């Protein structure tokens, strides 16, 4: 059985991510202990709220270096994905710099912010994270900031403008949507992360 650790970022959606794995019959533990994080087979980096508050939490918990040095697969969710890039204009804060890209306020195209609700996702063919998930499946989003498409984008979504719905580089993966709130497609993506990457 895989040792799955949800990094305790001090953000509010930790337990909902854990419950999503519980529903799949997959055991996941929430922890902020460096030894537990370092010895995990797979890691999750969830987050809600602002980038500046989340980075302060990670700094206070002395987790930044451990996350940056992680060699096992890690999945960032929502704000967790944004933190994987170099910089967030939400508070003008340097983020974890696990891959290139930056997080900006979504362009004002007349659509309300935050972008909230179900939207379809178009993903790169044959990516293991989306294995067995129908193209243009709907996932659940809640965000005002996003990562514009770049060389690490593996899935896009459009909300007046195209943005990265998922990114990946080396052992780091991120999704802007909330798989734990995205029904069958989200559950399948979480299972894929455990079994396929």
Image: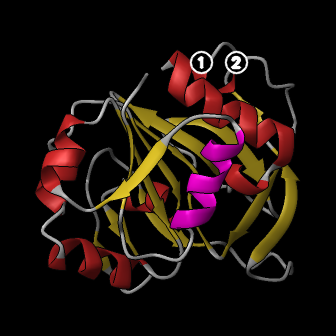
Of the pair 172 and 21, the residue shown nearer to us:
21
Residue 61 at x, y = what percent? 18, 73
What residue sits right under mark 1 in the picture? Answer: 128
Residue 50 at x, y = what percent? 46, 82
Taking the image as shown, residue 103 lies to the left or right of residue 138, namely: left
Is residue 3 visible in this depiction of the protein? Answer: yes
Query: Are the residues flagged by discs 1 and 2 in contact, CB closer than 8 Å?
Result: yes
Residue at 61% x, 48% y is: 164
Residue 82 at x, y = what percent? 46, 60
Determine which quarter of the picture holds residue 126.
Answer: top right
Magenta span contains residue 80: no
Q: Which residues are magenta?
A: 14-23
Neighbours of disc 2 within 10 Å: few (<14), some (14-19), many (20+)? some
Residue 104 at x, y = what percent? 51, 71
Label number found at residue 115: none
Taking the image as shown, residue 161 lies to the left or right of residue 190, namely: right
What residue sits right under mark 2 in the picture? Answer: 131
Q: Secondary structure at mark 1?
A: helix
């Amino acid at each position: 059985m895989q040792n799955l650790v949800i990094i305790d970022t001090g953000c509010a959606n930790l337990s909902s991510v854990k419950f999503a794995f519980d529903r799949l019959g997959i055991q996941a533990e929430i922890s902020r202990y460096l030894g537990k994080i370092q010895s995990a087979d797979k890691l999750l980096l969830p987050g809600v709220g602002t980038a500046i508050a989340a980075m302060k939490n990670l700094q206070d918990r002395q987790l930044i270096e451990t996350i940056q040095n992680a060699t096992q697969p890690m999945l960032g969710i929502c704000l967790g994905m944004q933190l994987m890039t170099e910089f967030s204009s939400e508070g003008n804060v340097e983020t974890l710099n696990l891959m290139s890209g930056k997080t900006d306020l979504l362009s004002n195209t007349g659509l309300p912010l935050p972008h909230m609700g179900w939207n379809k996702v178009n993903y790169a063919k044959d990516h293991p994270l989306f294995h067995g998930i129908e193209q243009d499946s709907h996932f659940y989003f809640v965000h005002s900031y996003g990562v514009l498409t770049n060389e690490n984008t593996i899935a896009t979504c459009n909300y007046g403008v195209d943005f990265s719905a998922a990114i990946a580089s080396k052992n780091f993966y991120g999704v802007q949507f909330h798989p734990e709130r995205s029904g069958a497609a989200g559950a399948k993506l979480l299972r894929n992360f455990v079994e396929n990457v």
